[in-house]
Image (cartoon, rainbow, N blue to C red):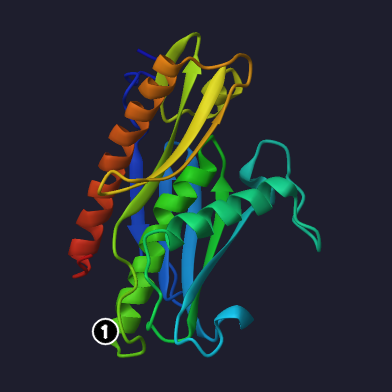
């Protein structure tokens, strides 16, 4: 049992609200414990130059943390975004593109924006799980309206973290756990069990193969639970993937 009362393999409380913004084509407010991320998706005509004339679509993502998302005010990103933010937005984009087939969709780009309202660990993984829903809502509505020639999303995808704290593997770290972790992992996976990406870092020591497998099993369990919630929400919206 952890100091917040959770079991070692238990996710933080997961709350997901959809259609929270009027102007966004798809919008999601996802909360994992005290971490809150607003994810939006907007569809615009046009694609990057390397896709022009192919009939294929594209998806790209941006990520930022609002100034009051952390206890000490975080400066806004200026012309030059911090390296962490660039890394995370690339991760979000890669993750969502891995479950899409943009060929013959039509030359449209899905713009994903993930804005962290409150940070308490796991902002990148919450962003991926929420951004998938925002993208699915956006694309399903565009397909229904006849804007797109096909629905590009083929599978569900979600992400979660795990880590080793006090030599014990545990799922979905909050900030206090993450800050004292000996090692941590972020994992992205689809609903068929295939892995999109794994990021693992030995912060204070290396990780054994057995520990790695334990962390991966924890992440897979958490991801399946998040994806089940995604499916419930899309079913309520009349969308099946």
Q: Where 26 falls versus 195 (above or below)? A: below
x and y, in percent, of residue 41 in the image: 46, 70
In the drawing, does residue 142 fall left or right of residue 74? left
Extreme residue toward the top, this view = 166
x and y, in percent, of residue 111 in the image: 53, 71
Extreme residue toward the right, this view = 79
- The answer to whether residue 3 is visible is no
Q: Where 29 falls versus 119 (above or below)? A: below
Q: Quadrant of residue 138?
A: bottom left
Q: Residue at x 28, y 48 (%)?
A: 227
Q: Where 174 falls versus 99 (above or below)? A: above
Q: Quadrant of the N terminus?
A: top left
Q: Residue at x 38, y 23 (%)?
A: 213
In the drawing, does residue 146 fall left or right of residue 164? left
x and y, in percent, of residue 217 in the image: 32, 27
| Viewer-proximal residue among 152 and 31 | 152
Q: Mark 1, residues whose alpha carbon is within 10 Å: few (<14), some, or many (≥20)?
A: few
Q: Residue at x 42, y 76 (%)?
A: 25
Q: Quadrant of residue 21?
A: bottom left
Q: Which residue is mark 1?
A: 144
Q: Where 48 falls versus 240 (above or below)? A: below
Q: Secondary structure at mark 1?
A: helix
| Viewer-proximal residue among 40 and 167 | 167
């Amino acid at each position: 049992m952890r100091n917040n009362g959770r079991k070692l393999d238990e996710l933080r409380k997961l709350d997901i609200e959809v259609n929270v913004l009027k102007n966004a084509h798809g919008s999601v407010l996802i909360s994992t414990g005290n971490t809150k991320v607003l994810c939006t998706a907007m569809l615009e005509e046009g694609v990057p130059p390397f896709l022009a004339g192919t009939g294929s679509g594209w998806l790209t993502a941006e990520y930022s943390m609002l100034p009051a998302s952390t206890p000490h005010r975080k400066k806004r990103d200026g012309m030059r975004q911090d390296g962490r933010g660039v890394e995370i937005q690339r991760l979000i984009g890669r993750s969502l593109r891995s479950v899409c087939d943009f060929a013959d969709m039509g030359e449209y780009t899905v713009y994903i924006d993930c804005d962290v309202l409150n940070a308490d660990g796991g902002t990148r993984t919450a962003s991926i799980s929420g951004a998938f829903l925002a993208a699915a809502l956006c694309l399903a509505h565009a397909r229904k309206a006849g804007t797109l020639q096909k629905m590009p999303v083929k599978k569900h995808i979600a992400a979660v973290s795990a880590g080793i704290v006090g030599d014990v593997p545990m799922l979905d770290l909050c900030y206090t756990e993450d800050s004292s972790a000996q090692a941590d992992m972020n994992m992205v996976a689809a609903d068929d069990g295939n892995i999109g990406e794994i990021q693992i870092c030995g912060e204070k020591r290396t990780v054994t193969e057995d520990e790695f497998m334990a962390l991966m099993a924890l992440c897979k369990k958490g991801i399946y639970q998040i994806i089940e919630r995604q499916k419930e929400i899309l079913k309520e919206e009349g969308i099946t993937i």
